[in-house]
Structures are given as C-alpha cells and as structure tokens.
Amino acid sequence: MVINTILSVMSYNYPPENLSIYLSDDSGSELTFYALLEASSFSKHWIPFCKKFNIQPRSPSAYFAQQIDIQDITYAQELLAIKKLYKEMENRIDSTVEMGEITKEIKDQQKGFSEWNSKVTKQDHQSIVKIMIDGRDKNGVDIYGGRLPMLVYMAREKRPQWPHNFKAGAMNALIRVSSEISNAPFILNLDCDMYANDADTIQEALCFFLDEKRGHEISFVQFPQNYDNITKNDLYACTFSVITNVELAGIDVYGATPYCGTACFHRRESLCGKVYSKDYRKEWNIEDKNNTYKSINELEVASKILASCSFEKETQWGEKMGLIYGCSSEDFVTGLAIQCRGWKSLYYNPNRMAFLGVAPITLNDVLTQQTRWSEGLFQIFLSKYCPFIYGHGKIKLGAQMGYCIYLLWAPCSLPTLYYVIVPPLCLLHGISIFPQVKSPWFLPFAYVIVARNACSIAEALSCGDTLKAWWNWQKMWVIRRTTTHFFAFINTVVRQLGLSKTTFVITGKVVTEDVSKRYEQEIIEFGSSTITFTIIATLAMLNFFSLIGAIKKIVLDLEFKVLDQLILQLSLNLLLVMLNIQVYQALFIRNDKGRIPTSILFKSIVLASLSCLMPII
C-alpha cells in the first residue's frame, strides 16, 4: 500500500528535477525501508511506462485491478512485462515481511541497512534519513534515460523520555528535513494509504497558487478525501458526500476551508509560520536554497539533526511553526491558525478524483476513527483556538460557524441520546412528550421532520448517492452520535480536568478475506465484545421493547385514543427500530464471525429490560 502511494506520486506529469518525494516512517521499520528500496528500483520501469502510454491511475495495484482495454500490440507486450516485474517485487516484499527480517544478501546491497540493529524499536530509535534516488544526479535515470525525482526515506528520532506529538511531530520533522534537501516552495502531504489518481494534479493546484490576482493570498489548497473501496450504498457512510460536495464548498466562500490532514497542497512559508501581508509577492526567480554542490552524505547528516528529538526544544515548532501540537486534530487547528495569520485557503473538488484512499471496512475501525476525530475537534473548541475566540476579528463569522459545525460533533451526542432513550421509555409508559395531532404546535414539529429529511435526501441524491446510501448515513449518524461522539465528549471533559492525557489510535488497514467479502455484500462487521457494541445493541433492544409494548397497549388493550397523543413518539420509535434492523440481524439471525457475540446479546437484553422496568414519573 505504501509503495503504491509512493509510485503514484513519483509518476506525476511534472518535471522530475523539480519533484521530491519523502516517506516519513514513524516506526523506523527496516521492512518499510526495504519496500521503498524495491520501489525505487521498480520506478525506473514504472515511470516511463506510465508516461509513454499516459495511463491513469498511476498506482500499480489500482491500475492493474481495473478493466484494461488492450488494442495496441506494443502496449500489450509492455503491460505484461511491467505486471511481471510488479508481481515479482510484490512477492519479494511479502516473503521478506513474512520472515520478519532482512537477509544478509539484501543488506549487503544497501548501506542504509546499517542504521538498524537489535536496539532499534518503534518507540526508541535514532533519526534515519536516506536519499534513495538523488534527483540532482543526471545519472539517476530510468531505463530510457529519463530523469527520476528525488526519493528520500526519513524516520525521525524517537525516545521514550521525549514527547513525539504523534502525526504533527512527524509532519514537522518532515518539513524541516525537506527544507534542507530540496526546499520546494510547495508541499503536498498524503497519508500512506491515499494514492494519486490524476497525473496532472500538481499543475491544477499550482494554477491557484500562481494566479496573478489571488494566488499570493493562498496558503493551502485542500482536495476532498475520496476512497476506492466504497460499496455501492456506502455501508459505513465514509464518503461524507454531502460534507465534501456541499458543506466544504460553502465554507470555501469565506476563504476558510479546513485543512483535513491529507490530500492538501501547502505553501511552505505559510506552513512554517509566516504571517500574510498585503505587500507579499513571492519572487519565483530567486532560489531559496541551492544544495546542488552538497554530497548525499552531507545532506543526510544535516537532515538527521533536524529530525532529532531535541531540535524543537525552546523553538516555535508546534506553536507558531508547522503543525500545532496539543490535540489529535492537529490538522484542523493548524489550518485555522494559518487563516488567522491572514492567509486564505481554497477547496478544490475536480471532476476526476485527485486522490483515492482506503476507507475502514469494519464498524469497529470506523468508530475508532470517528472517536479520534470528534475528540480532537471538541478539544479545539474548548481550547484557546476556539474559532469564536481565536478567530474573532481574523476570519469571518460565517467561517467561524462553519468550523464549529464539526467542532461540536461530540456535545451533539447528548440531545441524540435523549431522543434515542427518553421518548421510547415514555412511549412504553404511555407518557406524551410531544404535541397531540390536533394541537397547533404539532405543525412546527411535523414541518421540521419533513423539511429536514426532504432537504437531506435532495442533497444526498444531488451528490450522487443512492437512496439506500442516504439511509445508511442516517443509521451511521445515530450509531456515531450515541457511541463514539459521546465517548469523545466524556474523554475530552476528563482531559480538560487534567485526569488523562491525549492518545492517538491508528485506524486498522489490514483485514481478512472473509471480512472483505462481508463488506462487499454490505453486511455490517461487528465481531468483537466492546462497550461500543454493547451500547448499540442495548439501545436497539430498548427501542424494540418500547415499540412492542406500545403496539400491545394500542392494539390489544384497545387504547386507540392514546394514538393521537403518542403519534410522534411512535413514529420516532418505529424509525429507530427500522434503522437498527441490521443490528437485530447480527443479534439473532447471523451465524458468521461478524455477528454480535452472544455475551453482548444477553447484556443488551438485561440492560434494556431493566430500563423498561424503571418507573417514570
């Protein structure tokens, strides 16, 4: 996955002498270094193949996976040859990873392996910087004599006694190392699982930065996060299509598009803390730094110092320079801080998706990711970087409100939990909490329900979603709000009280074949006994019991007169039961490994039953 991302950006339609690719490996793994070494050799064949036949996309695995129309004999022959080379490389990497170590024969071929010994671990290792391909070297060419871009491996120093500040710390080290080696004025940052899907994206982004009227104002150009493994009906609502196509485009009107952490082109100066000035004009004909005459060894030694733990001590890095430290949504807060320095940002959603990543395909991974996001966003709202405070007088009120739509995901879990728990319990006990049908106050409630859902459906369909995809979004909206967003709210409050520290949980990317098969069939993957799934199952059973009890009271006990009083609650309860159909299937019908465990079934029944038996006054 990593090397496919690397190869896709190495193959951009852009002058290779002006293109440098850096891989930040925070675990300092020699296996990743070996994979990059293999990729550097394969690139000598892959890059000219891509440019000769102008293929898209330029991630090998993504390209080979699609239906390829072969009409030219020369192309067919070269395609078979390049597929064979790729498969051989893939097999070598897989076999090496399976062994868990690098053979002596491979180590002898590359002196960079001398950086690893028995003392090197993920959390305790020296800084490692290795230039795999020297883009300055005119002898560094592909099989046809074409220049290759610079390729650099970097693992910043990590020591147990030093805070490493998660992704923000890795990005800041990468910014410093790249400034020493190439110092390009623009930076594209990508997650390891997000490959370049359009070979001309760099030119499109530069059109904004180099625009004569507004280009000098722009700090970064954010592209949407898209995925190539989304099911037809977006099972876990990972695409955020309405957010991507409607909400972010709306915030862009204020020049305050949020920085989302990946698929983003940055102006190096603004990312390094420069405050915007109306008189600012970049002189592109002046070289910022000329390292043409420095040897590879000199660049690597100088870069290792910049990637050391102690370099940031008593500096502005993490505060006014680079990505900001202190919360797990460092990208969001960094984008806000840059905009408050006077810069503008821009959101660009081209017809051809510029980048494609891998969405999580199990419910647990989706919710883990959501917990991290919503927790980090709420931390921003409660910090000095709250848009209404930090952004006051610096960005427009509309932009401040646009940011807070996402920063307040966590506290919005509270009213959602109320609607999922209280109305069903009141319905079960025959207590009306909404206006009767004949009351004039019924109309506002009815209007909000109908208008909100009609607008939501219209937005989803206009963004290319199916009706079932919209329904899946409603289902996941309830699940996220009642679990991960609530956990994020509690965790953030506890952290604000000083009772815990920030952690960073990485979303899983590797899954088994049977999990993938169920995902393709759009079957929700539960499979583990967690408190999150216990809450989901308990709330589902609570609403089911309430619906059964209400129907019994109305139909069997012939209390039709209460229907007028309880129609809104009954409708809400029925809607929640329908949203939980796949939960009931996982509890009672399914027998695969992705079903909800029996232990959770018993817990949910007991907890829901006890809730129903509680007296409500």
Image: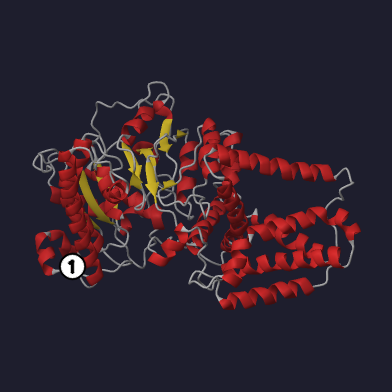
- The relative height of residue 546 versus residue 306 in the rendered view (above or below) is below
Residue at image position (60%, 72%) is 588
Residue at image position (58%, 70%) is 589
* Residue toward you, 345 or 301: 345
List x then y, in percent, for residue 309.
Answer: 32, 59
> Which residue is at the far top?
213
Residue 363 shows up from this direction: yes
Residue receiving disc 1:
102
Q: Locate the C terminus and report the quarter of the image it occupies.
A: bottom right
List x then y, in percent, for residue 560.
Answer: 89, 59
Q: What type is the residue that disc 1 sits on?
A: Ile
Q: Locate the N terminus and report the quarter of the image it occupies.
A: bottom left
- The relative height of residue 74 versus residue 383 in the rendered view (above or below) is above
Residue 134 shows up from this direction: no
Residue at image position (22%, 55%) is 36
Give the secondary structure at mark 1.
loop
Residue at image position (60%, 45%) is 405
* Residue toward you, 103 or 397: 103
